Image: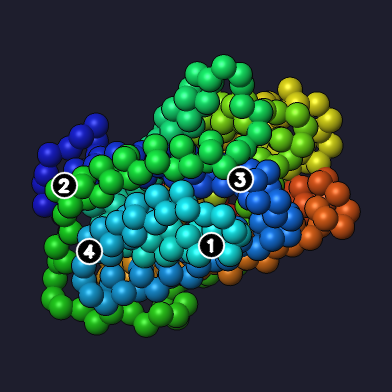
């Protein structure tokens, strides 16, 4: 990798991607995060349908992530896919202004997630390609931290606007949602401009290479084991829409939910970079195990919580889980798949492991809620998190990475 100017120890690609992620999440959190409240409060949609919409959206994104990663390896270019993905998501969000039925919402969620699916694996591979091997945790930790920082800005912006009225908005209305949709369009467009102007593809080194087939063949056991365990965990990791609905059920107003989500994202931001750096030192699996244990405790808490003030503490822990696991999980993929020509496919396979489980996870959670009450999906998720922790400890024993020269 040729020498280049560093920004706080990060390459230009990684540094700029952080701000692109910040702006995109600023846009998304204003609309997508509160979409379940629009569906439930304004359109009167049942939780099973909300779970179906979220599951289809998540699965669409993730199945496209696996193919876009492989295609970026085959094509030898990653930036065009990243740009197309961000552009599609940014263009689809303003159309929520016209949403008046849940099938139309589903179509727009589908388009938004197509954009995410197209860009994510090529972006992850480009971050890995732009980073020295002993700094992958730092790079992915920074990338993961900037996402929720954008969410904090978006949610606080929305909460501030809603608090300027003559009375506190306690529930979602069509007029409120449309106002927030218009607000969300601006930061998304700015993020697309940053990709156009500042992101550069990494030149492939060495001779022309044959792209890998889209399969698990040729990847080492640790990578395959991690994929399998990720599927188990994700089956219990339903959409955050159920956490939002549970919070509203316990009496939180719309503005309080926005501030709560901002606090959650702030904690994710604070934890992500230290967790990434820690994983560079003690190994990724140890950090992931700690995060999954926190997740299990949070879901147990949501199963038995009875007071609205208790939700605040649970969301703080939930932010710590996110910060400790998402960036570190991707850094683990970069660790075990060192060859640049296979990284796009590897990140695609990793994201596919999540996508295979995303649809049934959210749909099952919605059905469990309807049949046995709000505690059921959270108990299910907590149980699978403990199974995943045990499997990770046994099948993917943490090992200390080799010290940098």
Numbered disc in front, either 3 or 2: 3
**Residue 75's image quarter?**
bottom left
**Is mark 3 in CB contact (under 8 Å) with mark 1?**
no
Give whichever of 225, 249 is nearer the camera. 249
Upstream in sequence: badge 4 or badge 1: 4
Numbered disc in front, either 3 or 4: 3
> Left or right: where does residue 15 sit relative to residue 174?
left
Q: Is residue 81 above or below residue 291?
A: below
Q: Which residue is mark 1?
A: 104
Q: Residues within 10 Å of mark 4 (few under 14, many from 20)?
A: some
> Left or right: where does residue 247 sit relative to residue 260?
right
Upstream in sequence: badge 3 or badge 2: 3
Q: Which mark is residue 74?
A: none
Numbered disc in front, either 4 or 1: 1
Q: Which residue is mark 2?
A: 198
Q: Is residue 98 visible?
A: yes
Q: Which residue is mark 3?
A: 38
Q: Secondary structure at mark 1?
A: helix
Q: Residues within 10 Å of mark 3 (few under 14, many from 20)?
A: many
In the rendered view of the protein, which quadrant contains the C terminus?
top left
Q: Which residue is mark 4?
A: 80
């Amino acid at each position: 990798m040729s020498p280049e100017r560093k920004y706080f120890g990060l390459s230009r690609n990684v540094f700029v991607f952080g701000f692109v992620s910040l702006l995109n999440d600023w846009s998304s959190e204003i609309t997508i995060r509160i979409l379940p409240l629009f569906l439930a409060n304004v359109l009167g949609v049942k939780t099973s349908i909300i779970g179906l919409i979220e599951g289809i959206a998540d699965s669409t994104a993730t199945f496209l992530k696996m193919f876009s990663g492989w295609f970026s390896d085959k094509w030898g270019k990653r930036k065009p896919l990243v740009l197309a993905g961000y552009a599609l998501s940014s263009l689809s969000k303003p159309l929520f202004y016209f949403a008046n039925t849940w099938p139309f919402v589903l179509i727009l969620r589908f388009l938004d997630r197509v954009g995410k699916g197209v860009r994510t694996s090529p972006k992850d591979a480009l971050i890995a390609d732009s980073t020295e091997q002993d700094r992958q945790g730092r790079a992915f930790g920074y990338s993961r931290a900037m996402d929720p920082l954008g969410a904090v800005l978006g949610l606080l912006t929305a909460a501030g606007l809603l608090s300027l009225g003559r009375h506190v908005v306690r529930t979602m209305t069509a007029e409120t949602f449309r106002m927030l949709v218009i607000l969300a369009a601006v930061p998304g467009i700015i993020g697309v401009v940053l990709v156009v102007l500042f992101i550069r593809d990494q030149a492939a080194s060495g001779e022309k290479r044959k792209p890998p087939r889209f399969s698990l063949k040729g990847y080492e056991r640790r990578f395959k084991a991690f994929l399998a365990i990720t599927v188990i965990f994700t089956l219990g990791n339903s959409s955050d829409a159920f956490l939002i609905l549970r919070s509203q059920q316990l009496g939180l107003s719309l503005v309080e939910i926005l501030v709560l989500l901002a606090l959650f994202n702030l904690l994710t931001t604070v934890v992500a970079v230290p967790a990434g750096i820690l994983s560079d030192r003690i190994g990724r699996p140890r950090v992931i195990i700690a995060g999954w244990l926190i997740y299990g405790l949070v879901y147990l808490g949501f199963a038995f919580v009875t007071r609205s003030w208790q939700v605040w503490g649970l969301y703080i822990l939930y932010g710590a889980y996110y910060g400790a696991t998402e960036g570190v999980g991707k850094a683990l993929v970069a660790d075990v798949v060192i060859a640049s020509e296979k990284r796009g496919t590897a990140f695609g396979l990793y994201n596919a492991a999540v996508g295979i489980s995303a649809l049934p996870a959210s749909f099952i959670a919605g059905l469990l809620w309807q049949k046995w009450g709000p505690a059921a999906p959270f108990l299910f998720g907590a149980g699978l998190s403990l199974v995943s922790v045990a499997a990770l400890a046994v099948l993917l024993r943490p090992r200390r990475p080799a010290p940098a020269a």
